Image (spheres, helix red, strand yellow):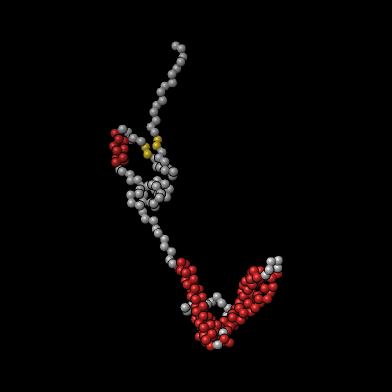
Amino acid sequence: MGTPETSREPCPDRILDDVGGAFGMGAVGGSAFHFLKGIYNSPSGTRLLGGTQAVRMNAPRVGGSFAVWGGLFSTFDCSMVYLRQKEDPWNSIFAGAATGGFLSMRQGLGASARSAVFGGVLLALIEGAGIMLNKVLSGPQNMPIMIDEPEPVPGMVGGGPPGIPAGLPGNPVQVAESGSSDSDSSWFGGWFGGGQKKEPATSGGSKTEILESFDAPPVPSFEYK
């Protein structure tokens, strides 16, 4: 719980920021609540008018109550930051307890103590939920990325990656050439006049062979003798 709260404003400006935010939240929420309540409690025919009157009478009061609570909470929070010289969720918990107790001081010491305990527990739950949510959201991002490398399939010709059949581009097939054909051609070439002449293969991989020439047969003559 020692993580500093870097998302909030600095301490002198934090009070005004929380007062304005609390007032807006209370005014908007109070307006919606009292508008529906005014429509429900008004007689038929004047429900819309009753809802608007309820908002006009109660929404500023609810917004002011929220603003007072937010201002006191931020004041106690800044006081705890000044006394402890660090930012952590314990400041918010102590500030919530102090705010609840301070607002209930007019009702007696027992009511003030109960409100202080309630405020501290409420802020502890809120801060704990925030810490757990941050851990859940930041957990998968810090995990190392595991990459499974493909293993060669035993028995595959060419030893290429799995899924690519032999003979396709990217998985060349290595064919071993035996020396028996060369020896046989040399034997037959020695006996029958040199055999076939071999030419180097072209860049395309095709073999060029020169065939032996034969004498053409004589052209027949059709002259009358």
224 relative to 99 in the view: left or right: left
Residue at the spot x=39%, y=42% of the render?
200
Quarter holding residue 25: bottom right
Quarter holding residue 112: bottom right
Q: Residue 98, how many percent across, how many down? A: 54, 84
- Residue sitting nearer the eye, 182 or 25: 25
Q: Is residue 91 visible from the viewing direction of this image?
A: no
In the rendered view, would you say 61 is above or below 150?
Answer: below
Quarter holding residue 64: bottom right
Q: Residue 92, how many percent across, how many down? A: 52, 80
Q: Is residue 144 visible from the viewing direction of this image?
A: yes
Q: Residue 151, how many percent across, how many down? A: 37, 55
Looking at the rendering, in which quadrant would you find the C terminus?
top left
Residue at the spot x=30%, y=35% of the render?
188
- Residue sitting nearer the eye, 25 or 33: 33
In the rendered view, would you say 217 is above or below 133?
Answer: above
61 relative to 183 in the view: left or right: right
Residue at the spot x=40%, y=46% of the render?
167
In the rendered view, would you say 102 is above or below 178?
Answer: below
- Residue sitting nearer the eye, 76 or 55: 55
